[in-house]
Amino acid sequence: MKKYLFILVCLLGFAGAFAQQHYSVPVNEPIYYMLEVAQIKGYCSRMPATKPYSVNQILAAIEEIQKSGKGLDAYELEVILHFKKKYEIPENGWSWQRGSYSNSGYLEKKDIPAEEKNLYSFETGVRWTSDLRINMASPHEFSTINFLDVFIRGDMSKYFSYNFQFSPGFYQVDTGAFDPFTFTKQWDGAVFPPSALADFKTHPDVFSFGFFVDSEIDLSFFENKLNLRFGRVRHDWGVTGGSLLLHNQARPFVAIEGFAQPTPWLKFSFLTGVLEYEYTSSIRDDAMEEQKAVSMALLELDATKWFYFNFGGGVIWPKRFELGYLMPNNINYFYQNVVGDFDNLSLTSTIMFCVPGYANFYFSAYIDEMNLLVDDFLNKDRNMYSLQGGVKFAIPKIPFSLLTIQYTKIEPYCYTNPKRETPWYDYDVHMNYTNNGENLGYALKPNSDELMFKFETMPYPGVKANLSYRMIRHGFVDGSEFSSEMDYSMDLNGAPEGSLLWKDFLKDGVYEWFHELGIGATTDFSIMNVPITLGLGYTFVYKYHTDYVGGQLQRINTADYADKSNHLFSIYFKVF
């Protein structure tokens, strides 16, 4: 009886031999890039497509890379050891290099075997981050984002970890200082200018105070084969150069999420969370029509080193007691047919062909809505989907270097949805694919495409550099904003060419074109025992417009659609 009781206690997460650090690493950390290149080169096994990873998962991957020693050169080994040192549990006491105090040991003082004792680790500290940007075009556009992270994190046994982070800061932001379609809010809810601290303000267009909170509770069993998280963090669900389902730029939201790997070749991830509203004028009125939740699931088949496949999807649903969407192993696409069509469903899939050690070729699709019975599939707005294809080459003889070539197309009305009349609500509820006004999926607006070339390298510990080119085209036609709402009352098959239900990319209205050339580098000076990270970047952006007139695509340059050249400079500074 005691044996079974001990096993039960272990599964509940209150016994263990080693502290494990199951809390997550933010998805914008450079370790994710290093691990991606390592997987392409075959230094370690393919990791789950659903990120963030826990510290423990990252350290396990680093250990696998070290043990394999396959093809590693001396510089790559130094890079790996740099990250290993960065994420290992620190020694007890104060560390000026980490800006934190740490303590770990046994909870029990009894004289019992170590493997039966409960271990703990605890760390608390601070980090400071500043992001300064300026657009030198006239009139100058300026952005400064500065915040202090105050965190408490640690472990209570082998299975249970926690992390809490509160980040007050001050901001003044003009989105024109950012590369096109890359801005994401670094504050929660509203901001507060000093002249009116009691008021809520939508955007810090003047100097303002604000804050954001990231927190999580984590459980992990069977050597990371079963993970559970209850938290509020940013995610990245994909193996391409930017997920169509859940992008790393998407705002965080509170969610219950999990990951299971029942066999070496099968992985399954899921989450259910509550989405947040965008504050514009009222903390009550703005939120009323944004009472929505999200559920997602992704199944990964990874049977051979040559081929990878995933399939899944999501559903945006009004907050109500709907048990079916809480079931990870339920199929939402079919479940809607038994509870009623009040929700916004999506499907996604990625196919990847791998040349081990050299390159990954991939194709990804996201389906918001499709009607296969229309008389002209490609030119009807009712077919809302996104497509993405590309290749990632691991550059030989240059440590941790990667060349990405990718094309992405977002159709009109994709990621949008009309407000829905919903049971339990006296008003319609938004069902678009957004959280706090920002897209959950790929970081482009509907009715856009993007061609991207990007070279990245990590030639030395703590150093990461990049060179990129992007061409983006976005149309000012119906269905080109996340707030767009399709009129389903119109006759779909009877819609003539040029009507509101008709689409013809580049030929159905005015389009803005962006040609963007960027270069940047980041250096982590902790390799020299200096707790500072410094980043510099420059991007040249040339913007112009076209219209389709007289059967030809023509450039236009008017007061409303003027050509513009932007010179964007950025400085990133982080302490600890």
Image (spheres, rainbow, N blue to C red):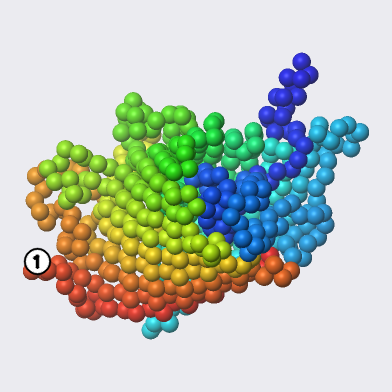
Mark 1 burial class by Cα count in 10 Å: few <14, some 14-19, many 20+: few
User: In the rendered image, which residue does mark 1 sit on?
Assistant: 551
Residue 213 appears at what percent x and percent y?
59, 54
**Residue displayed at 17% across by 45% down:** 377
Q: Which residue is drawn at 50% across and 35% down?
A: 265
Q: Quadrant of residue 567?
A: bottom left
In the image, taking residue 199 as reference, residue 335 lies left or right, namely left
Amino acid identity at mark 1: Gly
Q: Residue furthest right?
A: 111
- In the picture, the quarter occupied by the C terminus is bottom right
Residue at left offset 16%, top offset 61%: 508
Residue 522: quarter of image: bottom right
387 or 431: nearer the viewer: 387
Q: In this view, does 340 lie above or below 255?
A: above
Q: Which residue is drawn at 35% across and 33% down?
A: 333
| Picture coordinates of residue 402, whole percent (x, y) | 48, 61
Residue 26 is at least partly visible in this image: no
Image location (x, y in percent) of residue 572: 56, 71
Q: Is residue 559 visible?
A: yes
User: Residue 82: x, y in percent?
Assistant: 67, 61
Q: Which of 60 and 152 is in front in this view?
A: 60
Q: In this view, does 3 lie above or below 196?
A: above
Instruction: Kindly state the secondary structure of the residue where label 1 is placed.
Output: loop
